[in-house]
Amino acid sequence: MKIRRAVGGWSIVAGLYFVALLWADSKTGVLRRLPELVPMLPVVVSATLASIALRFARWHWLLRRAGYRVPAGRSLLAYVAGFAFTATPGKVGELLRVRYLVTAGVPASRVVGAFVYERLFDLAAVLLIALPAAAEFHVFGVAASFVALVFAAVGVMAARPRLGQRLVVTFRRAGMLRLARAARAVTAGLAHIRLWATLPDMLISLVAGLGAWLVTSWSFVYLLASLGIVLTGFKALALFPVAMLAGAASMLPGGLGSTEATLVALLAAAGAALAPASLAAVGIRLATLWLATVLGMAAFAYLETQPQPSRR
């Protein structure tokens, strides 16, 4: 991927998000209330780090199952570096990992395949956790349909790589060379997903996803309770996953805006006041998406200063 273009795109997204925060502050005073979150940060940040650790363990497992023995330190740095540009449409910025894993002997197509496989089981895990709230707010059908559509699309493309090859040819004939290259990379990656189509791999991937997103969901419930918004039962645990599904379905970079708006709407429907609901929504996003982005930028900056090993 083009690093300068990615940095420029990230800067624009971050700038727009800050402008949106300024607008929200004029309505709810959310920015002025951010210091209220400081006492809660250790718990929420720890939950985010635990979530990242679980997801990395799954990632490292997938690479090892594919036969690649990448040193754990480099694998972790490459994985975290992918979060630097996670606020991109479809999270394709996470494919920055290709840049650092190819030189460690992992083909780009394998990295793409592992990335798509991870996203699939994240979607499945988030849907399962979201069930109580999705059913209560009558959005289960929409959420389940979205996840099923994604699984079906990936399954068809993985089973029939010729469909992807036809797309590549079509884009080339139309002079869309960048789209052709992207379609070729995705097609090659999807073809490798079949390697992990085993019961142990799927169970491990789903359990790791459930653990990662349950930890994050619990941290949001903790944040709500600390702000005086007390919700009981599994519904509270399911609110953040429902918002994550809405953000993914919106196809906005990182679900920015749509995830926060969904959280505020769900909390308002549950009886929460607008000001604390907005603060909770912004707080959980700062401690998850933006924290991961900062960690990714740090890993990215470090890797860029290191000599890259030669290809094996």
Image (cartoon, rainbow, N blue to C red):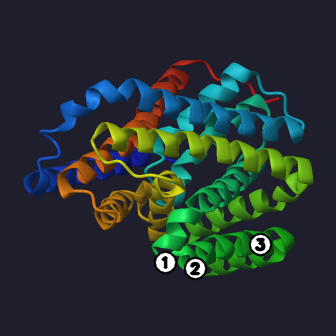
Pick out the residue farthest to the left. Answer: 26
Q: Residue at x 50, y 46 (%)?
A: 217
Q: Is residue 218 above or below residue 245?
A: above
Marker disc for residue 157: 3
Q: CA distance from mark 1 to mark 3?
A: 31 Å
Q: Residue furthest front?
A: 232
Which residue in the protein does label 1 denote?
138
For label 1, the SS is loop
Q: Residue at x 78, y 27 (%)?
A: 70
Kind of residue at disc 1:
His
Q: Quadrant of residue 283?
A: top left
Give the amino acid type for the residue marked by disc 2 in the picture.
Gly
Does the image show residue 175? Answer: no
Please identify the quadrant where the C terminus is shown: top right
Give the camera-side residue of 131 and 200.
131
Q: Position of residue 22 (x, y in %)?
A: 14, 50
For the residues labelled 2 and 1, say whether their Cβ atoms are less than 8 Å apart. Answer: yes
- Secondary element at image label 3: helix
Residue 159 visible in image: yes
Taking 72 as reference, is 11 above or below it?
below
Mark 1 or 3: in front is 1
Percent x, y of residue 164: 74, 73
Instruction: Judge from the rendering whether residue 89 lies leftward or rightward of residue 114; answer left or right.
Output: left
**In the image, which is nearer the foreground, mark 2 or mark 1?**
1
Q: Amino acid at mark 3?
A: Met
